[in-house]
Image (cartoon, rainbow, N blue to C red):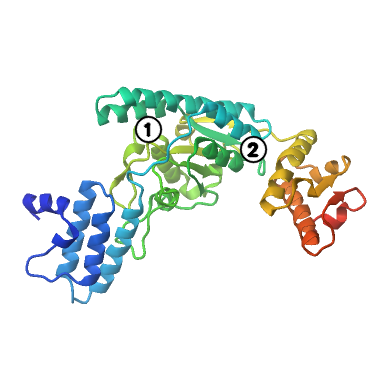
């Protein structure tokens, strides 16, 4: 395709798409409409139009159907990438602090670090407002990312690492996505496969971006210490590219095969320990140790956070379930000592579900849990 044709395809309208000497099949015209009506970077749009022109020329040939399916799938993914869509950050530090305080008990270091991050973004936006070019604004964003390392939560299973990550996104008014890395055995799961492979798709990074629908979500890289040993070096290499602001503004997924700007994504990471994580990746992150909870702390969490939350989810009044004080010790240790809160949360949820069933069956409107009747409400482990 010569330069003149390339220039035309960048500005082409759906009704003007044509290939000299060929009739545009209706199914191809639908793809043209989709590409033209959705935002794509100009160079990528040109690339897609070239693919469609080639498809028109292959119409009626033995390989046409397979080629159509391949290009159709590629277009579906490329137009789904949020190239220019972003959510507005909540930069009200008082509001963010309130969300953090009302959803999580303790974790003061984590909360302060999030508020510091929001303060940096706030100052970035002020500087961007005064910048005189898009290039200058991008440089400010990059410098801000370098000044704000990735938060890396390390602690025992069930301690609340995923939960605090979700709350961080909520406090910032950003979408949240989690990429599970436990057992990951191939770096291509992150980066995607080339379209030369049958039934190829983008990697988990692009899928998370598409699921979020914005270019600035919070993405948690979960359990990064549990990747498969044989693929760990390659996976750590991709992670370094994701977390490095000098590289992540042009992340190349093998399926999309076009640079995707991840510089506005807030990446978080979690692990049970730091074993098996490369030093280069560790250097890009700020390690925050999340200690286990004492029994007294777990009682506060169960009574003041988990129970009200589950009652609200279930649709039951706040006063529907009450507990004798001595019951809380048994709820926090249904299976013996556990530094996390996952088992305790399941216990609370089971009690609320049991009470909800009784309420619907007309067996009461209010339920008081005592040491004597607790077993009636507890799940069978």
Q: Residue 6 at what x, y percent from top left? A: 12, 51
Compared with 156, 116 (above or below) is: above
Q: Quadrant of residue 356?
A: bottom right
Dot placed on the residue nearer the N-terminal end, 1 or 2 = 2
Q: Quadrant of the C terminus?
A: bottom right
Marks 1 and 2, how far apart at CA: 30 Å
Name the foreground residue: 42 vs 361. Answer: 361
Q: Residue 304 at what x, y percent from top left? A: 74, 38
- Residue 276 seen in this snapshot: no
Q: Quadrant of the N terminus?
A: bottom left
Disc 1 marks which residue? 245
Q: Residue 27 at what x, y percent from top left? A: 25, 70
- Using residue 298 as the reference point, say whether residue 86 is left or right of it: left
Q: Which mark is residue 103?
A: 2
User: Which residue corresponds to the image point at 27% horizontal and 49% vertical from the top-left?
Assistant: 40
Helix, strand or loop status at disc 1: loop
Q: Residue 53 at what x, y percent from top left? A: 16, 63
């Amino acid at each position: 395709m010569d330069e003149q044709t390339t220039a035309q395809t960048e500005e082409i309208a759906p009704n003007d798409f044509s290939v000299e000497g060929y009739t545009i099949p209706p199914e191809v015209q639908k793809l043209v409409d989709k590409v033209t009506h959705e935002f794509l970077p100009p160079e990528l749009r040109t690339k897609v139009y070239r693919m469609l022109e080639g498809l028109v020329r292959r119409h009626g040939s033995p390989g046409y159907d397979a080629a159509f399916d391949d290009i159709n799938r590629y277009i579906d993914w490329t137009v789904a990438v949020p190239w220019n869509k972003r959510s507005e950050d909540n930069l009200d530090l008082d509001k963010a602090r309130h969300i953090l305080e009302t959803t999580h008990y303790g974790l003061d270091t984590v909360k302060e670090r999030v508020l510091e991050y929001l303060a940096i973004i706030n100052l970035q936006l002020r500087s961007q407002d005064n910048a005189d070019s898009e290039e200058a604004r991008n440089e400010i964003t990059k410098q801000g990312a370098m000044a704000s390392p990735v938060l890396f939560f390390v602690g025992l299973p069930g301690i609340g690492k995923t939960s605090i990550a979700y709350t961080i996104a909520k406090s910032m008014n950003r979408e949240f996505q989690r990429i599970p890395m436990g057992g990951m055995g191939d770096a291509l799961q992150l980066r995607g496969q080339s379209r030369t492979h049958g039934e190829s798709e983008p990697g988990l990074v692009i899928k998370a971006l598409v699921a979020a629908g914005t270019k600035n979500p919070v993405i948690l890289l979960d359990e990064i210490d549990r990747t498969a040993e044989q693929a760990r070096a390659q996976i750590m290499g991709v992670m370094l590219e994701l977390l490095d602001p000098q590289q992540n503004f042009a992340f190349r997924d093998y399926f999309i095969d076009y640079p995707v700007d991840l510089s506005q994504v807030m990446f978080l990471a979690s692990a049970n320990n730091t074993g098996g994580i490369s030093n280069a990746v560790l250097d890009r992150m700020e390690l925050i140790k999340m200690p286990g909870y004492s029994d007294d702390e777990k009682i506060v969490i169960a009574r003041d956070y988990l129970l009200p939350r589950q009652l609200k989810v279930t649709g039951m009044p706040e006063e529907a379930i009450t507990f004798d004080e001595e019951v809380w010790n048994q709820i926090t240790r249904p299976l013996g000592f556990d530094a996390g809160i996952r088992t305790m949360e399941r216990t609370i949820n089971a009690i609320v579900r049991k009470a909800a069933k009784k309420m619907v069956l007309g067996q009461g409107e209010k339920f008081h849990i005592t040491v004597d009747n607790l077993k009636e409400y507890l799940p069978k482990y």
